[in-house]
Every structure is written in C-alpha cells, then in structure tokens.
C-alpha cells in the first residue's frame, strides 16, 4: 500500500513546489487534508478522490464533514437537544431522504457506481476484467467467500 502514499506524496510535493516557485502562500493544513483523503481513496478504492489534482474540496466532501462533526460537538454539550433535532422521530417522515445531503456518502457511492455494478442487496459486482489490489476488493472477496447467513 506504499504505492498509494508514494503517488500522492509525489503530487503533493509537486503542488508545494508550484506554490514555492510562484512565491504564493499555502495553507499546509488544507493541503495535508487533501493528501490524506487521496491516500485513503487510493488504498480503499484504488483511485484518488482528486483533491490533490484539483486543489480544492472535491464535491464539497470536506465542507460536509465539517458540518457533520459540528452537530455532535454542539449536541454533546446539551444532549437533550438531540431529541428535538435529528433524534426527533418526525425527522425521517419530513426528510425521508436525509442521506442525500451527505456529500461523503454521495462521493463514496459515485466511486462505487463508477467501479462496478451496485446490486440491490448492497453488494458490488466488479466489472469483468478488473483486477484490483485495494481494500474494497479484499472486503468483497471476504464477503463473497462468507456470505451472510439469514
């Protein structure tokens, strides 16, 4: 899996060199997040998410994560508020497709759809001829070798 780290590090260093050559300031924290997410994408899906190549928040994933983590921070201070907010039993009735707001889920599903056929049972059947050495392929092989027992 070192290839994932190495390929992303090469792009990361190239981007930093571009900033240095142009004497532009760089937000290292943001670019390290881009690097980390592309490494994770390469390890899990054998495909970079595209943060380093695009140099921005692809599909609003990072903004979404910030929004998702803000809720538990606030509700952690006042746990009773959860029952009135997202823990309210009326929320699924009025917002039945609330998961469509989750950019992380959308980005993951987009990658899965591009990768192969998503089956109704939630499994993924890889496209013919694709041989990958990523974590998703390993997890799918384990699932196919030991299907759930109902």
Image (cartoon, rainbow, N blue to C red):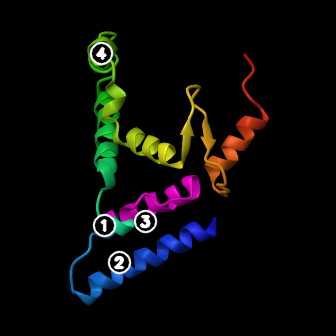
The residue to which callout 3 is attached is 35
Q: Residue 64's spot in the image, x, y percent?
A: 31, 43
The magenta segment: 30-51
The answer to which of marks 2 and 1 sits earlier in the sequence is 2
Q: Residues within 10 Å of mark 1 (few under 14, many from 20)?
A: few
CB within 8 Å, label 2 to label 1: yes
Q: In front here: 121 or 40? A: 121
Q: Residues within 10 Å of mark 3 (few under 14, many from 20)?
A: many
**Label 2 with label 3: CB-CB less than 8 Å:** no
Residue 118 on image: x %, y %: 54, 36
State the residue in front, 51 or 35.
Answer: 51
Q: Are marks 4 and 2 in contact (CB under 8 Å)?
A: no
**Which circle marks residue 15 in the picture?**
2
Task: Place residue 144 in its image quadrant.
Answer: top right
Query: Which mark lies nearer to you, 3 or 1?
Result: 1
Q: Is residue 39 magenta?
A: yes
Q: Which residue is mark 4?
A: 91
Q: Is residue 68 left or right of residue 109?
A: left
């Amino acid at each position: 899996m070192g290839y994932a780290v190495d390929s992303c590090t090469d792009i990361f260093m190239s981007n930093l060199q571009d900033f240095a050559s142009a004497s532009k300031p760089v937000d290292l924290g943001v670019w390290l997040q881009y690097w980390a997410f592309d490494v994770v994408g390469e390890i899990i899906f054998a495909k970079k998410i595209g943060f380093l190549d695009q140099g921005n928040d692809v599909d609003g994933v990072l903004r979404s994560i910030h929004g998702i983590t803000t809720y538990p921070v606030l509700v952690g201070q006042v746990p009773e508020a959860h029952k009135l907010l997202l823990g309210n039993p009326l929320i699924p009735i009025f917002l039945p497709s609330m998961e469509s707001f989750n950019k992380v889920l959308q980005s993951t599903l987009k990658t899965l759809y591009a990768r192969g056929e998503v089956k109704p049972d939630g499994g993924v059947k890889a496209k013919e001829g694709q041989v990958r050495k990523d974590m998703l392929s390993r997890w799918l092989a384990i699932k196919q070798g030991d299907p759930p027992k109902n």
